[in-house]
Amino acid sequence: MNKPYVKLDRDNAAVLMVDHQAGLMSLVRDIDPDKFKNNVLAIADAAKFFNLPTILTTSFENGPNGPLMPELKALFPDAPYIARPGQINAWDNEDFVKAIKATGKKQLIIAGVVTEVCVAFPALSAIEEGFEVFIVADASGTFNEMTRDAAWRRMEAAGAQFMTWFGVACELHRDWRNDIEGLATLCSNGLYRRIN
């Protein structure tokens, strides 16, 4: 049975940046590390450009998972920042769920590390609570293609939709005539940013 096309709505969407931490990012092998970091920053830039509520979260950052990417904290200095003391599934953290529900948005755009855990667990939990979930596939990473594909299948079966950062940006924008210079800058940064 085909599912209906659900468009992202900038008035009803929030972005969740889950566990983009130094230690976890070093584990990503299903996408080139520089491309991956670029894609993470591109979806973050899109969230900023469209003024979407954005929630940052980390897990056990004082341990091997390490600190959040400093670029994300710099880009969203006033965003809710939930440093989870140990919960693996971000949805198990009461402050994280409260921050999401406080946005009043029903569409969640999720990116994170690692895909089959830090992305899949909160995505599945959100779907169970009635949210529409959109996974940013190229800004979510894991150990290899096999673990990634298993996670994608599990989330898709539950109703998650998969997109790329560029697809998210274009669907939110809707029309090239809307602030073409701003969108062109966003896309140019995302496609051509140089990662040091």
Image (cartoon, grey):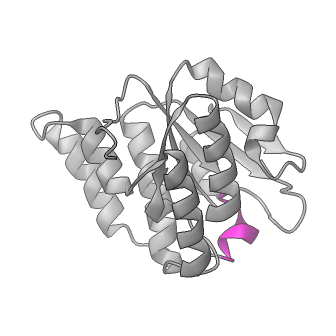
Q: 165 or 51, which is in the foreground? A: 165
Quick check: can you spot residue 140?
no
**Is 2 part of what is drawn in magenta?**
no
Q: Tell me: residue 41, above or below residue 126.
A: below
Which of the 4 image quadrants contains residue 187? bottom left
Residue drawn at x 71%, y 45% as measured from the top left: 57
User: Relative to residue 135, is residue 29 drawn left or right?
Assistant: right
**Is 24 part of what is drawn in magenta?**
yes
Which of the 4 image quadrants contains residue 188? bottom left
Residue drawn at x 60%, y 48% as measured from the top left: 17
| Residue 67 percent location from the top left of the image | 76, 59
Q: Tell me: residue 92, above or below residue 59.
A: above
Quick check: can you spot residue 103?
yes
Q: 195 or 118, which is in the foreground? A: 118
What residue occupies the far front of the structure in this picture?
1
Q: 153 or 32, which is in the foreground? A: 153
Residue drawn at x 31%, y 55% as measured from the top left: 166
| Residue 47 percent location from the top left of the image | 44, 40
Q: Tell me: residue 82, above or below residue 154.
A: above
Residue drawn at x 33%, y 36% as measured from the top left: 6
Disc tally is 0
| Residue 174 percent location from the top left of the image | 19, 36
Q: Which residues are magenta?
A: 19-27
Which of the 4 image quadrants contains residue 140? bottom right
| Residue 167 percent location from the top left of the image | 30, 52
Q: Tell me: residue 20, above or below residue 170.
A: below
User: Relative to residue 34, is residue 11 drawn left or right?
Assistant: left
Q: 44 or 144, which is in the foreground? A: 144
